[in-house]
Image: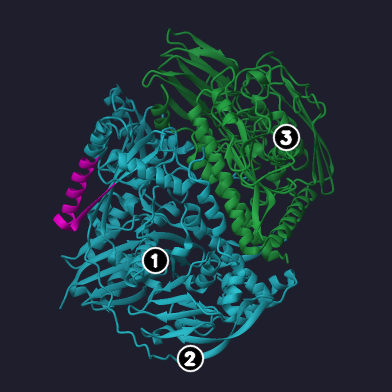
Amino acid sequence: MVDAISLEIFRSALTAIAEEMGAVLMRSSYSPNIKERRDFSCALFDARGRLVAQAAHIPVHLGSMPDSVAEALVAFDHFAPGDIIALNDPFLGGTHLPDITLIAPIFVEVEEEQRLIGFAANRAHHADVGGMAPGSMPLATEIYQEGLIIPPLKLWEAGQPNRALLALLLRNVRTPDERRGDLAAQVAANRTAARRLQELVDRWGLAALEEHVEALIDYAARMARATIAAIPDGCYRFTDYLDDDGVTGEGIPIAVTVTVRGSELTVDFTGSAPQVRGNVNTVASVARSATYYVVRCLMPEDAPMNHGTFAPVTVIAPRGSVVNARPPAAVAQGNVETSQRLVDAIFGALAQALPEVVPAASQGTMNNIAAGGIDPRTQQPFAYYETMGGGMGARPGLDGLSGVHTHMSNTLNTPVEAFEYAYPMRVTRYALRDGSGGAGQARGGDGLVREIRFEAPAEVTLLTERRRLPPYGLQGGEPGRCGENWLYRRDGEVTLLPGKVHFRAEPGDRLVIASPGGGGWGQAPAPALAAAEGA
Amino acid sequence: MTAILAGVDTGGTFTDLVLFQEGKLRVHKVFSTPHDPSQAILEGLQELGALPRLRTLVHGSTVATNAVLEGKGARTGLITTAGFRDVLEIGRQTRPSLYNLRVQKVPPLVPRARRVEVVERLNERGEVLIPLDEGSLEEALATLAREEVEAVAVVLLFSFANPAHERRVAEAARQRGWYVSASAEVLPEFREYERTSTLVLNAYVGPLIDRYLGQLEQALPAGTGLRIMQSNGGSISSAMARREAARTLLSGPAAGVVGARFVARASGIERLIALDIGGTSTDVSLVEGAITETTDGRIGGHPTKLPMIDIHTVGAGGGSLAWFDLGGALRVGPRSAGAVPGPAAYGRGGTEATVTDAHVVLGRLLPDAFLGGSRRLDVVQARQAVGRIAARLGASLEEAALGIVRIANANMEAAIRLISVERGLDPRHFTLVAFGGAGPLHACELAASLSIPRVLVPAAPGVLSALGMLVADVLKDYVRTLMLPIDQEQAQATVEEALLALEEQGRADLLAEGFAGERIQIERYLDLRYVGQSYELTIPFGGDCARAAQQFHLAHERRFGYSDPNEPVQVVNVRLKARGLVEPPVLERQPLQPEAVVQPLERRQVIFAGEAGPVAHEAAIYERSALVPGVQFVGPAIVTQYDTTTVVPPGWRARVDAVGNLLIELAGDGPAGVQQLQQQRRQPAQAASAQLAEEGSHVW
């Protein structure tokens, strides 16, 4: 029997399983993105592929984990204990190629019979999956340049590893040993979930588990409906822009119409740009993730995360647009950069409905930096990828935080001392970027400045946004300052780099990344000083 | 007339004293005197007549902790390498919660204006890239002088690889008369943010601890040795604590675990889970012979990398409030009724239902036996508060009360699972040692849901921290970052050399504490990881790097479910513990009286969960002091004592052993209660783990 008490007990037990999967993955993986920066997600699904629990790991996967399981269910009509399905194809349940998802069907023993009760899935951002540049986030124009594409395939079958698939996969990436280690960590995470679910069934019985899963889905939907019902009904429109796609230099509109009717909410991206040549396109699941993230922010902090949570939410992403691109579009940045702009656009619309709740725009980028080459200390190849925090948008009556990751990301930085052990580069400055937050009654948070000196030749890719069009302020607050990327060549030449750029660095060159500030909120009491020029 | 050893734990409300003299332990509690904590200490010692013969006093207090939590530490400055003064504020560039639009970060303990830079730079090998610029040092010190700082932390990049620059800066700062703390002296370990945070904490609480302990030294009779409890479960001399104050930050809970291990050992138990349930939170910690440690501690949101006992805390305790969330689910905690107004049953104006109120409704907390009968619990208020929850649930009063306890238990259970099951340890091999005001109330039910076969309630569960202080060894921790491949040719020599240097330092420090020769025990460890990973596992080092690597693979397997002996392993840090062995008191063993029969004080109705809902049982009520060694009884029963109440559910059997510990175990035969408890957990979870073991360790 389900009651308010047992509901809470199952909720915490299922969430704990997803959290524990994450702990296993984080502590035993190799890719900096997974181990240091938590760029991964772990979730449980029922046998029909409905989300049962998802740990609060990274928002950009909110809407897309169920798609992975759905595609696995399409690709295979039979599962056996010990199967593990791998995929990274953005057009078949993935997001962008570095995100590899591993899905394990979970069988439990009930009355001496193995019964499929659901799936455990985890997705992790691998440091490299091949393609035309180290880090697999190149300035590409089609997906084939971005790396190896894995459609849903069984990496393990009935408890046996598929060595041919693994060999093919590892032969196509730059750092195969790391990949093998990361995949092992992902397998271990799924096994952990299987073990814990078996314990849960042993303890409470399968019927009780299934009953409570239904109840939890209803419960989450109730909570979401109560949240949406508190937003005034109406139609709210907003358009924000990406700087460019890295190929042509033009702003790319992200248009959104948010319609609230009673306890239902629809986000419609009709009017956004058609898909573009560069890699800022997203697949539809990223558009859903951005929407779900915004709705989730309006809910209580510890709200449950399952199939019911987003039942009252509809997302319309026109096919062939920049938010629902078709193959062979390049999508590497959609996940990290465009997703941020989608959030900015949705919040921009909702600010009209909830002016006392919605914050001004945050930095709106993850400031992706990738570098690769040969480390002269070891003669081994290195592949570095990192993202950088910046200014958070001011909140009504509350300043934005400085130097943090905002919205769709919350990954850790690499400690300077760890960085210099690992790569032939030095950090020569790491500081808050004073005065970059937008003025207002509440100030936007400041961005960061990170200055890197190269000690060896390196191929460098920057994927950064808000270099031309600043994060907006709200209710009279000033916009935050744009980010800036500077290259100081050893011979004295100084260049202000574009937001999206690939170049070769030589020893002695210095790269300065200044991340954007957050927008201000409300009219500043005194006339705001014009922001000074330069980084 | 033998000398007296005393453990004194100063808490917010009570100061607990435990004395050891002539083979006997004596326990005393006095009210704390927060304006001058030494007053209560002296008063307590006086009342026990212990002052004249006091030889050593081991002390733990919340002075440092409170200074951090309340933001009342010293006015502190920070000196860093040029370009990095904001590292303290940026931290790891994350926001503390993902979906909270009004999320806040804990402000740094040193604001921008007091963070200054010196021009210098080393590389990862400790080689000088930019020599220390004396002019910039002068300027930095001048700024701090203008800012009127009292304490200064010095943290330069890669100082653990070469401390020369840092030493020079610290020396110059000390000449200004400030309390100065340099990172290579306290924590020569890589990762600059966590090191900086640790050093800032040390400087921030240093002057306070320095003054506090200075006063206490003065107040004690001349010749009394004063030792201070640390977060790592060992003590150090007062003089050392005054220099490295951050080592004492979480000494109270740590001492509780040491105390729990001590009493469990006296009963022959080496593997235990310490369960300390207080008013607002539950602390759990695992002891498998050795106490589990961590270097990932936090205090008031500030990381500290100094080794401390690994205590996991959840916001569930007696005062935790029951409430309904937006989706209509019943929740318990983390918000607490606190001391004021406290649970409704305290009759001080609290109206919301708490876990304590639920226990009152269930008849598990006796209204007239609370705090030795000095305070009556208000049953009417408790029933009204829980009644409101029941009304909303559409359930009976008893169902609601059981529900509140079950949810609180679920939170506590999750905490225990995290430190046991999730680390590859099976709780069925452990004993649950319950203490704190509410630990013994919940222990048996928690044990049942985790398949823990046995619960131990110490004779004096309210003063376990003070007892832990009394028995703690003197313990010094040392670390040094090396960062080298373990199979490298010179690895063995480099590791040995580094450990030898740490050992020399350890022996010298312990000599200063009055230990020598056989009374010093040295423990060596390596922090190892696969090349490319970011988290290390600490592995005991027996002298052979290859062997340590093998042990690392096994530990990795146990912790994470896989290992790969072909992957290269890296030595990140060497660690050393120098332990000064304290002659621990031996608990007096009393002969068991197998014929001893104890008559219950009375019998009362107490409610437990049955298969179809709440069932009232006639439970025997015992007073703990009447339970002499050898006594046995079966549940349902309630044992009351001054500051805790023990619940023995139906189907459990309790006995008092020779050292006075109450041991409660699931009865072997099958009264109704056992079936009911077994019903709750069906089968122990062997199937899956066994299956997993068969799958083999190596993923590929």
Please state, as top left, top right, bottom left or bottom right, where the N terminus of chain A lies in the image. bottom right
- The percent coordinates of residue B210 (x first, y second) are 28, 53
Left or right: B216, with A93 as reference point: left
The residue under label 2 is B601
The residue under label 1 is B11
Sequence-first disc among 2 and 1: 1
Label 3 marks a residue whose chain is A
**Residue A152 in which image quadrant:** top right
Q: Give the range drawn in magenta.
A: B499-524
Q: Disc 3 residue type?
A: Ser
Mark 2 or 3: the one toward you: 3
Q: In this view, does A428 lie above or below A398?
A: above
Q: Which residue is drawn at 32% across and 43% down?
A: B548
- Residue A29 visible within the image: yes
The residue under label 3 is A285
Label 1 marks a residue whose chain is B
- Residue B33 visible within the image: no
Q: In this view, does B154 lie above or below A109?
A: above
Left or right: A101, with A319 as reference point: left
- The percent coordinates of residue B345 (x first, y second) are 58, 77
Label 2 marks a residue whose chain is B
Label 2 to label 3, Cα distance in Å?
67 Å
Check chain identity for marks 1 and 3: say if they share one.
no
Q: Disc 1 residue type?
A: Gly
Q: Which residue is drawn at 18% across and 74% down?
A: B52
Q: Colour of chain A?
A: green
Q: Chain B is drawn in which colour?
A: cyan
